Image (cartoon, rainbow, N blue to C red):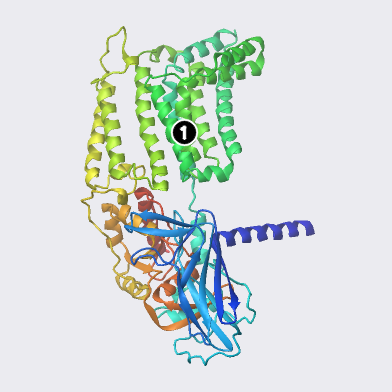
């Protein structure tokens, strides 16, 4: 029992450490270095988590939050010169802010020099900085310091410091040592204590207490249930459809009647023949399911989850799918060494029982590789980048069940074989159509890499142009306007059947549907695949959605009066991904209508520099004191205290009493997912009204 208790405590400790690392992507420490009797350097040193970056100093107005130094009534010393960054600075053009931004990755130091003017000095102030990754940004965060020390014995009298703007409490105790490190917490998402609630209500809110009441546990409960079986079901169904398509290829369909007839004829007992055919189908499921599990085991959950945004992997996937598409077009054929299939086939012939049947199923997998590999490859790529660490296994299970189903059904109902369509040119048509689809999906993965590296080779209008061309050509192919070499029979093209012509018309219509997107139409059907709207250079769609309120209490009071739920938007003037969401998602007509008509929209800018009427010192859940100086500090504190988050963009749907209606939503350029988020909030309001 004692060992179990220790184990549980260790597990909780590890979880706490992981949560702390997630909450603090930037880790600052501050120290003073007295380089001479009359010169003191305040050094802010940071280590930055992988994927995050901290912006440099003196960025132009209207951009991200620059690193800025603020002195607060120091005595006996004066700041000398500007804040100096030290580290490997990266500079790049930012298309959203239309300016060149500079930032640091991995580590950086900022140094502020002081000139000592008295025998004893007291320096006090803070560093303000901004940090972002590809998905979100931290609010402007402060690193505070309070140091004392001795200056030269013969120093002139210092000017008296004006202390009228100092807060009532100091966040950190003064430090007499000239080289003492003071670790500073960047973010804290622990449970909210009662004192913090009282401080929030008494000093910050002029509305009802419930508006500021912490809802960390309630929001976590919603977020914890946000992952549903929908993604698993989607991956499974995607695999099942892929398996059905693989059935109707020249490598698989002709094998079905031969295999089923073999099992029924090799045994005089029909039941045994049916049992063997079912075993054959189960063997196919086992083989492909093992492949999915092997992919997960080789890469691991962490790697698979990172594939969705990893630029190198996405370039590899792009090239892989292009190769698969060209093989389906008939340029070349993907084949495994014939000796592999021959060896497995001879082994199956020389053995008996279940092993023989399993080896026959394995032979099918090898022989059909040229047709199934592109489908399996696309499926594994999609499943692996889905964020589900067992996604490949779920996809392969669906694929294998669809592939094995006809072998079992035809064994149970042999008369169906006579009614099944015969092999013919229609199977080659399926291969070519799959080639077009693989080519279209390949562009999706190249788009991810293009956005990550900022190449701007595949902006939205270029992507849509290529998709229009791909689906236009596919439509022309299906209606018989042109042929591939593999479609010719005795050198002559055959007319396309009526179903192909109908599908061709649908493909042409889809291509025409995307044409207005070249001028800024949202094209919701492809929004999950196309690059975001902000990458489009020529855009006639100037629709904007702006919040009616930028003050939390005013907005909540309005929502209370109107009886509407609230859409809380924790954002920032310097938040790149916030602008992306507003340009790509909020401008969608359906989204815009819901935001403006069904909710009271409140945007809270965590980097608003407007000073508060009076500075406030609040106590964070960790016991650390924090000085709120600006309106942005106030909204940042609200986000952390009420919801346990400290990143932007963050969207929370609450009722007009401040209670969450569903889980939170962050950066995800998916119109469908965002609409589903809004619908869940509306259903949550209706449920709350009934309760």
Of all residues shown, which one is farthest toward the front?
A: 154
* Left or right placement of residue 639 versus residue 347 in this view: left
The residue where tag 1 is placed is: 379
Look at the picture and state if 377 lies above or below 427. Answer: below
Q: Is residue 38 visible?
A: yes
* Image location (x, y in percent) of residue 327: 41, 22
Look at the picture and state if 665 lies above or below 474. Answer: below
Q: For this rendering, which residue is in front, 217 or 476?
A: 476
* Image location (x, y in percent) of residue 6: 75, 59
Point 25% across, 44% down: residue: 517
Q: For this rendering, which residue is in front, 472 or 364?
A: 472
* Image location (x, y in percent) of residue 687: 41, 60
Point 37% across, 49% down: residue: 670
* Image location (x, y in percent) of residue 431: 38, 22
Quadrant containing the N terminus is: bottom right
Q: Image quadrant of residue 470? A: top left
Element carrying mark 1: helix
């Amino acid at each position: 029992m004692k060992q179990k208790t220790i184990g549980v405590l260790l597990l909780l400790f590890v979880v706490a450490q992981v949560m702390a690392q997630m909450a603090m992507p930037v880790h600052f420490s501050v120290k003073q270095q007295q380089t001479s009797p009359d010169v003191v350097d305040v050094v802010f040193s940071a280590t930055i988590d992988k994927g995050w970056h901290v912006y440099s100093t003196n960025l132009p107005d209207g951009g991200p939050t620059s690193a800025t130094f603020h002195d607060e009534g120091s005595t006996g010393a004066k700041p000398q010169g500007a804040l100096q960054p030290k580290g490997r600075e990266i500079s790049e053009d930012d298309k959203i802010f239309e300016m060149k931004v500079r930032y640091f990755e991995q580590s950086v130091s900022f140094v502020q020099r002081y000139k000592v003017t008295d025998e004893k000095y007291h320096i006090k102030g803070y560093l303000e900085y901004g940090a972002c990754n590809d998905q979100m940004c931290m609010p402007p965060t402060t690193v505070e310091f309070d140091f004392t020390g001795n200056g030269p014995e013969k120093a002139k009298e210092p000017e008296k410091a004006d202390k009228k703007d100092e807060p009532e409490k100091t966040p950190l105790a003064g430090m007499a040592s000239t080289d003492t490190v003071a670790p500073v917490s960047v973010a804290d998402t622990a449970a909210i204590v009662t004192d913090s609630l009282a401080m929030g209500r008494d000093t910050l809110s002029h509305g009802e207490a419930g508006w500021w009441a912490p809802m960390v546990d309630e929001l976590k409960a919603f977020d914890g249930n946000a992952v549903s079986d929908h993604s698993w079901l989607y991956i499974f169904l995607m695999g099942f459809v892929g398996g059905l398509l693989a059935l109707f290829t020249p490598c698989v369909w002709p094998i079905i009647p031969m295999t089923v007839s073999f099992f029924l004829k090799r045994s005089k007992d029909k039941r045994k023949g049916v049992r063997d055919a079912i075993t054959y189908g189960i063997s196919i499921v086992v083989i492909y399911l093992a492949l999915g599990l092997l992919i997960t085991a080789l890469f691991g959950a962490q790697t698979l989850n990172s594939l969705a945004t990893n630029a190198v992997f996405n370039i590899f996937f792009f090239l892989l799918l292009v190769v698969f598409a060209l093989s389906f077009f008939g340029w070349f054929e993907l084949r495994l060494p014939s000796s592999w299939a021959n060896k497995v086939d001879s082994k199956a012939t020389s053995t008996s029982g279940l092993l023989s049947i399993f080896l026959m199923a394995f032979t099918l997998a090898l022989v059909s590789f040229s047709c199934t590999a592109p489908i399996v490859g696309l499926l594994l790529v999609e499943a692996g980048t889905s964020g589900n660490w067992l996604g490949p296994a779920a996809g392969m299970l669906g694929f294998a069940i669809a592939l094995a189903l006809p072998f079992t059904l035809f064994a149970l109902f042999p008369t169906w074989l006579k009614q099944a369509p015969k092999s013919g040119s229609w199977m080659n048509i399926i291969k070519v159509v799959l080639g077009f689809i693989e080519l279209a999906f390949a562009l999706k993965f190249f788009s991810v890499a293009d956005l990550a590296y900022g190449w701007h080779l595949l902006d939205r209008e270029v992507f849509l142009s290529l998709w229009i061309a791909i689906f236009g050509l596919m439509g022309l192919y299906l209606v018989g306007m042109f042929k591939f070499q593999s479609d010719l029979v005795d050198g002559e093209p055959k007319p396309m059947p009526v179903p192909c012509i109908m599908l061709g018309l649908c493909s042409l219509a889809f291509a025409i549907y995307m044409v207005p997107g070249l001028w800024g139409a949202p094209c919701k059907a492809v929004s999950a695949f196309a690059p975001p709207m902000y990458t489009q250079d020529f855009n006639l769609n100037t629709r904007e959605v702006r919040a009616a309120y930028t003050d939390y209490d005013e907005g909540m009071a309005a929502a209370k009066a109107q009886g509407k739920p609230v859409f809380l938007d924790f954002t920032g003037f310097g938040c790149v991904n916030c602008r992306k969401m507003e340009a790509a998602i909020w401008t969608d007509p359906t989204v815009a209508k819901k935001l403006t008509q069904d909710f009271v929209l409140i945007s809270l800018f965590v980097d608003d520099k407007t000073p508060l009427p009076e500075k406030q010192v609040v106590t964070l859940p960790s016991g650390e004191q924090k000085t709120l100086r600006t309106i942005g500090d106030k909204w940042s504190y609200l986000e952390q205290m009420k919801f346990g988050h400290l990143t932007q963009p963050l969207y929370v749907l609450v009722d007009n009493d401040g209670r969450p209606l569903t889980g939170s939503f962050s950066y995800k350029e998916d119109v469908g997912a965002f609409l589903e988020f809004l619908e869940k909030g509306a259903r949550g309001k209706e449920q709350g009204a009934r309760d």
